[in-house]
Image (tube, helix red, strand yellow):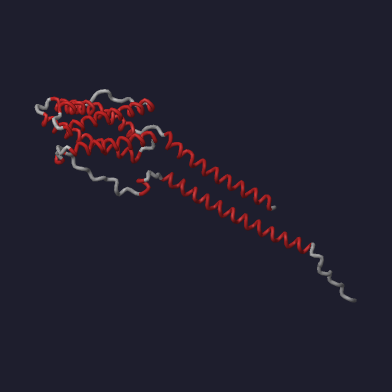
Amino acid sequence: MSSGSDRGLVRALVLVVLLMLSQMAVPAMASAQTATLTDSDRDLLNRVRQAGLWEMPSGDMARTRAQTPQVREVGQTLMVDHGRLDVQVRALAAKYGVVLPDQPTADQQSWLAEERNATTSSDFERVFVNRLRAAHGVIFAVIAQVRAGTRNDDMRAFAATANQVVMRHITLLESTGLVDYNALPQPTVSTTASTSAAGALNLGSMTILTSLLVVMLVFAATLLVLWLIRSSSRRRRHRSGEENYAFDGNPEPAPKEPVR
């Protein structure tokens, strides 16, 4: 095989390897960019929309019924922030065809009624702060799960924004000094702490096998390229020695015939 053929084979082999790697990488990148919504993604959109349906009127009531200026300011902040989140939720729902609720749930309506029926400003403030603090604690956990595991770029950005908003609301509600922490639900111990590394990274057996095959392919291709280069170098040195022997001008004399 000539050196030109060797170089052509090496280039062709490198191109094949690069093409295979690019074909395996492109679908993974594309899926992260254009993934449709999962059930957990849709659930988060519904929950945030549902939260706004009762927390916005609840914050509006706090602006007028609360006696403490700090509680009135908290109510104003919650109302404005949830109004902004609601705009984002409806935009994402329209983009991905998610049907959102348009009425508070039965529990949420009962919480609004509890606030409306408070006989004094102090009673209202206590109900307002504790109902809102408990509700934000529930949605906070849901947002964190979606933010950690969603495959959709839009949902990842939305969950990050919602996480910041809910964290700010929890801090503001707690700053009033009215939160009854003993009434909050106890945190649950996660049962996923002992999952394997592959499970934690969402790596299935086929994904692991594909990764191993890619590594083996690259390794084998590298060895083959090195072998071809080394073999080509040896042939060039061999041909160079033959040429030097043919044209050095001092060929060895032919052996003489024995004298008879």
- Number of labelled discs? 0
Q: Is residue 257 visible?
A: yes
Q: Is residue 179 visible?
A: no
- Residue at figure coordinates x 49%, y 50% from the top left: 215
- Give the quarter of the image for residue 107: top left
Image: 65 above or below 255:
above
Q: Of 214 and 147, which appears nearest the observer?
A: 147
Residue farthest along the front direction in this orientation:
69
Q: Tell me: 159 left or right of 260.
A: left
Q: Tell me: 211 left or right of 195.
A: right
| Residue 156 on image: x %, y % | 36, 37
- Give the quarter of the image for residue 122: top left
Image: 75 above or below 198:
above
| Residue 144 on image: x %, y % | 30, 39
- Residue at figure coordinates x 25%, y 30% from the top left: 51
| Residue 123 on image: x %, y % | 11, 31
Q: Tell me: 54 left or right of 155.
A: left
